[in-house]
Image (cartoon, grey):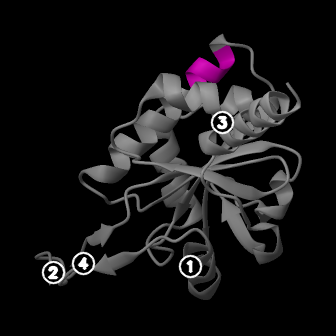
Amino acid sequence: MKYFAIALISLFFYSCQSKFPEKEFVGNSSKSLVNQDSVSVDFPKRYKGKILLVSFIFTNCPDICPLTTHNLQRIQQKVKEEKIDNVSFAAISFDPERDTPLALKNFAEVRNLDLSNYNVFSGKREDVKSLMETFHIVAIPGDTTFTDDGDPVYFFTHTDRITLVDHDQNIRKSYKGSEINLDEIINDIKNLGD
């Protein structure tokens, strides 16, 4: 009976751990970012004590970023419907030269983002690059072309990911940003909240 109880306890702890395959602390990597309202924030330090879903985007993206942004909105809406508190959302641009606070504000308005617990950030190139490394994000710029007016046109091949960060600022799980399983993510958020 004693061995059965030990095996049962071990199985319980293993099954809890298997829900969240990652546990990587990111709290020491805070950088100063600026949101769509030109407010400076220490990221991710500002979110300590909250569950955080993070994506990395650029506002001129033609494909993956709009899908990821829409999926974060779907998660945000479901979190509200389920009355799950203490969850925040962040999208960080890896194109800070073009993604000024005004560009981020326009991006948020065009996409009807509910900014009550969702921010779109940009920052200094070196700070964004450091956060990308922390969150294991890669963005490779393509060749640049120019419009008739001389404006540069370029895109990035980049990591397609939404990252779940717990209250203690540990990365706990990553999801494909452009194709999510909404129920899985909501269950994961609930399990972190327990």
Image quadrant occupied by the C terminus? top right
Q: Which residues are magenta?
A: 76-80
Report the mark closest to the observer, 2 or 1: 1
| Kind of residue at badge 3 | Ser
Q: Can residue 110 be seen? A: no
Among numbered discs 3 and 4, the one appearing first in the sequence: 3
Distance, label 1 to label 4, CA atoms, is 29 Å
Instruction: Give the number of the disc on residue 146.
Output: 2
Please name the residue that numbered disc 4 is placed on: 151
Q: Which residue is mark 1?
A: 133
Residue 189 image point, x, y percent: 68, 32
Q: Quadrant of the N terminus?
A: top right
Spatial CA distance of label 1 from label 3 is 29 Å
Q: Residue 175, percent across and down? A: 46, 47
Residues at marks 4 and 2 touching, judged by CB atoms closer than 8 Å: yes
Kind of element beneath mark 4:
loop
Residue 52 at what x, y percent from top left?
70, 46
- Give the amino acid type for the residue marked by disc 2 in the picture: Phe
Q: Is residue 79 magenta?
A: yes
